[in-house]
C-alpha cells in the first residue's frame, strides 16, 4: 500500500467515529479496511541469535554502534553525550548526512549538561565529524526536524517550563528559543508543510495535544498556540492557550474541555496526517489535518508489557518511512523493541535489544538517514564503560548506564539508491543565511524561503558549518532564564 493509500485507509477508519476525552480503542475495520493487528513483518521474523552488538534483527540487516556515552565518536575527538534521545537526519550536499541527537540530562542531575550533539557522515556512512550544536539546555527529550533544515529540540523539564529551541544541524547559526511555542514538559513537535502548522505533544499524565500556527511561516518567533478538543464523533476543534508562558497557570489547565492525551510522546507529520503516541494508554494516534478528525490506530496491552510475544505496549518516539508508508515506533522499556506498523496495518517487531545491561532503559530517537537504508536509534540508559560521574560534569553517580546509539543498515522498503538532491543547496542556503544574519543576533533561526522550496522534510540540505558557541538566543524580551 502506498503512502497515499495509507492516508485513504486512515480516512475510512476515521469515518467510523472515535470516542472523546476517554479515547477508547477504535477499530480500523471501516469501509473494508483491515484493523491494525499483530502479524508477520514484511521484513521477516527476528533472528533468534543476537548479532555482535546484542540486537535481534531480520535477515539481511546488520548493525553497528555509532555512539557510546563518554567515548569518542568514530575517529573524532568528540565524546558522545549521556542519555541519547530524540533525533533526525539532514542531507548534506556531498551525498552524506548529519545525524542530530538530544541529550536528556535533567537539571537536577547536572545543570545545563543536556543539549544536542551532531554527527556528520560522508556518502559512505563514515563519521567524519562530531560536535555540539546546543549547550546550556536540559532535559532535551524529543523534538522534530523542519522542512527548512533545522532541528527543533524540546525540553521536558519537570517544572513545566521546558522550551522549544531551534538548532542548526551544521552548528553555523546560534540556537534560538521560541517562547511563543509555549512552556511545558515538551516532548516532540512535527511540522506540516501543507497547512503551515506545527503540532506538539506534552509528556504529562494530564497533558494536552497542541497546534501552533506561526504568524509568518516559517518564522516561528510569533504565532497562535491552541489545544485540541476531540468530540465523541472524532471531530477535532482547537481553543487558544491564553498564556503560552505558563506563568499564570500550567498550559494544560488553561483550556476548559481540552482533551487529555496522557503522556504524549513521539510526533510525526506525513501527507496531511499527524501521527503521535501516548504512553500511559499505550496508544498510537492519527490526526487528519484536512478533515480535522482523530483516530486511535493502535492500542497496546499494558497487562502484557514486556512479556515475550507481546507487541508494542510501551509506545514512545516514532519516525515515518515516507516511501513505504511504514511507521516505526520505539518502546519505552517493554521488550526494548523498535516496532513497525506497516501501511497494510500489520504490527510487528523490527529490532530488539537483548544484550545485558539494558534493563530499565528505553529505546529512543528512531530516524532514517535521507536514503532510508539506515535507521538510527538509542538505548537511552544502555551500559557504558564510564560512570555517569565521569561522563557528565557535575553529576554524582557511580552508575555506568550513560546510553548507546545504534545504526541498522539493510533493505528497508522505502530505501532510495542515492541521496535526495536539491537545487544548488550550498548557494541557496548560504544566501539565506546571509539574509538571516542581516537581522542581527536575535533574528529567528530560519534558513529561508528559498530553502523551504528545495529542502526535503526531515532532510534539509546542508552546506558548510561553523560551530556555534554559547547557549540559545531568546526571541522574547526577557532572557533572564535562558540557561534554566
Image: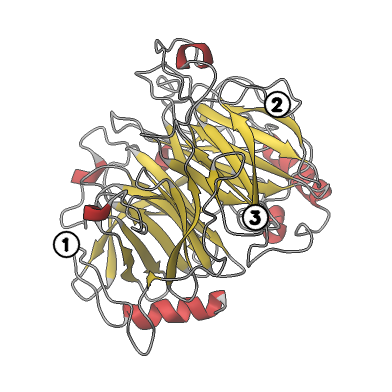
> Secondary structure beneath disc 1?
loop
- Looking at the figure, which quarter contains the N terminus? bottom right
- Looking at the figure, which quarter contains the C terminus? top left
Within-10-Å neighbours for mark 2: few <14, some 14–19, many 20+ = some
Residue 43: quadrant of the picture: bottom right
How far apart, in angstroms, are the residues tagged by discs 1 and 2? 47 Å
Q: Select label 2 or label 3 by which is in front.
A: 3
Q: Which residue lies under the disc numbered 2? A: 467
Compared across the picture, whether 72 is left or right of 352 comes to right
Q: Is residue 153 visible?
A: yes
How far apart, in angstroms, are the residues tagged by discs 2 and 3? 34 Å
Which is nearer the eye, 473 or 118? 118
Q: Which residue lies under the disc numbered 3? A: 61
The tag earlier along the polypeptide, 1 or 2, is 1
> Secondary structure beneath disc 3?
loop
Q: Which residue lies under the disc numbered 1? A: 22
The tag earlier along the polypeptide, 3 or 1, is 1
Q: Find residue 402 and report its horizontal and vertical position in percent.
A: 48, 25
Q: Select label 3 or label 1 by which is in front.
A: 3
Compared across the picture, whether 69 is left or right of 105 comes to right
Amino acid at each position: 500500500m502506498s503512502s497515499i493509500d495509507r492516508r485513504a485507509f486512515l480516512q475510512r477508519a476515521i469515518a467510523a467515529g472515535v470516542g472523546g476525552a476517554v479515547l477508547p480503542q477504535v477499530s480500523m475495520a471501516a469501509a473494508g479496511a483491515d484493523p491494525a493487528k499483530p502479524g508477520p513483518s514484511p521484513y521477516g521474523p527476528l533472528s533468534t541469535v543476537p548479532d555482535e552488538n546484542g540486537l535481534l534483527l531480520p535477515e539481511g540487516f546488520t548493525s553497528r554502534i555509532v555512539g557510546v556515552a563518554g567515548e569518542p565518536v568514530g575517529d573524532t575527538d568528540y565524546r558522545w553525550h549521556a542519555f541519547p534521545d530524540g533525533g533526525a537526519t539532514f542531507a548534506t550536499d556531498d551525498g552524506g548526512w548529519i545525524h542530530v541527537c538530544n541529550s536528556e540530562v535533567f537539571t537536577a542531575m547536572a545543570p545545563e549538561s543536556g543539549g544536542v550533539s551532531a554527527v556528520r557522515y560522508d556518502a559512505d556512512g563514515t563519521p567524519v565529524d562530531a560536535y555540539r550544536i546546543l549547550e546550556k539546555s536540559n532535559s532535551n527529550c524529543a523534538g522534530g526536524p523542519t522542512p527548512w533544515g533545522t532541528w527543533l529540540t524540546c525540553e521536558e523539564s519537570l517544572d513545566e517550563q521546558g522550551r522549544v529551541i531551534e538548532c542548526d544541524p551544521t552548528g553555523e547559526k546560534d540556537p534560538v528559543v521560541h517562547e511563543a511555542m509555549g512552556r511545558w514538559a515538551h516532548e516532540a513537535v512535527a511540522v506540516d508543510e501543507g497547512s503551515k502548522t506545527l503540532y506538539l505533544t506534552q509528556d504529562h499524565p494530564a497533558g494536552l495535544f497542541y497546534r501552533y500556527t506561526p504568524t509568518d511561516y516559517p518564522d516561528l518567533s510569533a504565532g497562535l498556540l491552541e489545544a485540541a478538543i476531540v468530540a465523541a464523533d472524532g471531530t477535532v476543534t482547537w481553543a487558544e492557550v491564553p498564556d503560552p508562558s505558563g506563568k499564570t497557570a500550567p498550559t494544560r489547565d488553561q483550556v476548559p474541555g481540552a482533551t487529555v492525551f496522557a503522556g504524549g510522546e513521539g510526533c510525526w507529520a506525513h501527507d496531511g496526517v499527524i501521527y503521535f503516541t501516548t504512553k500511559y494508554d499505550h496508544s498510537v494516534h492519527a490526526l487528519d489535518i484536512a478533515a480535522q478528525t482523530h483516530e486511535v490506530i493502535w492500542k497496546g496491552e499494558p497487562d502484557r508489557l514486556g512479556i515475550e510475544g507481546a507487541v508494542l505496549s510501551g509506545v514512545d518516539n516514532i519516525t515515518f518511512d515516507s516511501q513505504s508508508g511504514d511507521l516505526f515506533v520505539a518502546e519505552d522499556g517493554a521488550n526494548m523493541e523498535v516496532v513497525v506498523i506497516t501501511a497494510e496495518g500489520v504490527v510487528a517487531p523490527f529490532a530488539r535489544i537483548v544484550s545485558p545491561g539494558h534493563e530499565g532503559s528505553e529505546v529512543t530517537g528512531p530516524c532514517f538517514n535521507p536514503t532510508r537504508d539506515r535507521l538510527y536509534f538509542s538505548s537511552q540508559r544502555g551500559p557504558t564503560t564510564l560512570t555517569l560521574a565521569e561522563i557528565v560534569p557535575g553529576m554524582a553517580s557511580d552508575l555506568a548506564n550513560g546510553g548507546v546509539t545504534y545504526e541498522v543498515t539493510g533493505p528497508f522498503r522505502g530505501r532510495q539508491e542515492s541521496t535526495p538532491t536539491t537545487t544548488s543547496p550550498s548557494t541557496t542556503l548560504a544566501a539565506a543565511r546571509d539574509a538571516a544574519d542581516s537581522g542581527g543576533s536575535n533574528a529567528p533561526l530560519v534558513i529561508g524561503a528559498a530553502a523551504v522550496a528545495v529542502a526535503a522534510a526531515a532532510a534539509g540540505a546542508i552546506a558548510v558549518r561553523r560551530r556555534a558557541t554559547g547557549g540559545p538566543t531568546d526571541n522574547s524580551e526577557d532572557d533572564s532564564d535562558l540557561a534554566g
